[in-house]
Image (cartoon, rainbow, N blue to C red):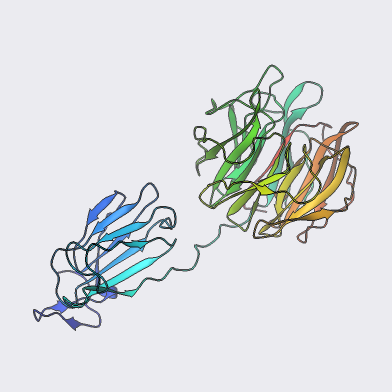
Amino acid sequence: MSGTVVNNTLRDSGGIALSAAGLNWVSTVVTGSTVTVESGNGYWINTTSNTCTITLPSSAEKGDQIVFVDYARTWGTNKIIIDSNGLKYQGQLDVFTVEYNINGQSLNIVYSDATKGWIPLDDDATALEPSPPPTQRAIFAYGDTGPAVSMSNLVNSSGVVGNDVTGVGTARYYAACANYGTDKAIIGYGNSGSGDVSLSNLISSSGVVATDTSGVGTARDSLAATGFGVGLAIFGYGNAGSVSSLTNKVSTSGVVASDTTGVGTARQFPAAARYGTDKAIFAFGSTNKANLVSNTGVVSADVDGVGSSKEYLAGAGYGGDKAIMGYGVTSGLTNVTNLINNLGVVGADVSGVGTARNILAAASYGGDKAIFGYGAAGGKVSLTNLVNNLGVVASDVTGVGTARSGLVAGEYSTSA
């Protein structure tokens, strides 16, 4: 038997049993739906794609030990099931169901005797995984100046908007944009002026917009997008001839998944933003509802809205773990905002600052701040409003770049 022997304990046979520190750790990560294990080993169990049933040895001696670790922190989504293979588990017969379903959990079991069988020494969940560094820069892109355009404007870590950059890819408006891969962004869907499209454009960590990628999923416009989890993103809702509640997830490498049948009330022109560091929210739009998104991308059922019903608004994260949504249309143009706390609870209306307008965009910048920009206020405008890390909106800043509406905004780059 290989491995370091630590805190030796004697088995019934007189042999030496290894403590958890001296286990033989199996090098292959378990990803299947079933696995049969052996005493004296530690196993990494990855349930990203499926539940895993773990079959313990059919015979065991006092002091035999096995450890299991949640490799990808996904046991809360896809649990592990322990099959004690004819032996008892915590004194219960093998017919009892034994499951573990907490993200980040590890399970350290030792065999006692025929009376109690396998007994957990511990089944604790470790602290949350380290959070990626916050994004520092933002981009405004595409939009409507009369015709659809594909230009962009970069925003530095101080909230200063740069000059127009000649666009790449199909010009369009009413698309959506979100951060993915922790330091990049993706623009997807929208209307080219000739109809809805489902293509996407990736934005590098240096703010360079790539050429079109053929889209996946239903072509639509008037949707929203946001990051969630670690490096993941999601597009949701919109209009595909009629309003929809479809969603499309985006992987950490920027690959857009096929349609997921939506949850919640179909609507168009909502806003979306990240909150609580790894979760997200879609809110408002053509119906005053909110839908929370878990850190695995599961969209919740409707939550009744708070504050004035509005659409054509924008949203962004601020303060590291909170979000703000604002502007848009109620019975007319508005500059009212609503703060969203780190639990995803939407706050009451906050009296607006700056020019009331709609069809604008917003993004986070500088690690913990946000910016609203552009839009339509009778005519198209290029002004911006900065949001500090307490969620306070500043007065208008005369814009840089071409005035336009129906554009998108997103975060990129973890370097200031």
Residue visible at 75% across and 29% down in the picture: 143
- Location of the N terminus (image quadrant): bottom left
- Location of the C terminus (image quadrant): bottom right
Count of labels shown? 0
Residue 10, above or below 171: below
Rendering coords of residue 326 (x, y %): 79, 46
Q: Is residue 24 left or right of residue 133?
A: left
Is residue 172 visible in the rendered image? The answer is yes
Name the image quarter holding residue 207: top right
Name the image quarter holding residue 66: bottom left
Rendering coords of residue 10 (x, y %): 15, 82
Is residue 29 visible in the rendered image? The answer is no
Q: Is residue 304 left or right of residue 259?
A: right
Name the image quarter holding residue 56: bottom left
Q: Is residue 209 left or right of residue 90?
A: right
Rendering coords of residue 239 (x, y %): 66, 28
Residue visible at 44% across and 53% down in the picture: 77
Q: Nearer the viewer, residue 57 or 202?
A: 57
Q: Nearer the viewer, residue 294 or 149?
A: 294
Q: Nearer the viewer, residue 77 or 140?
A: 77
Rendering coords of residue 100 (x, y %): 37, 62
Residue found at the far top of this picture: 194
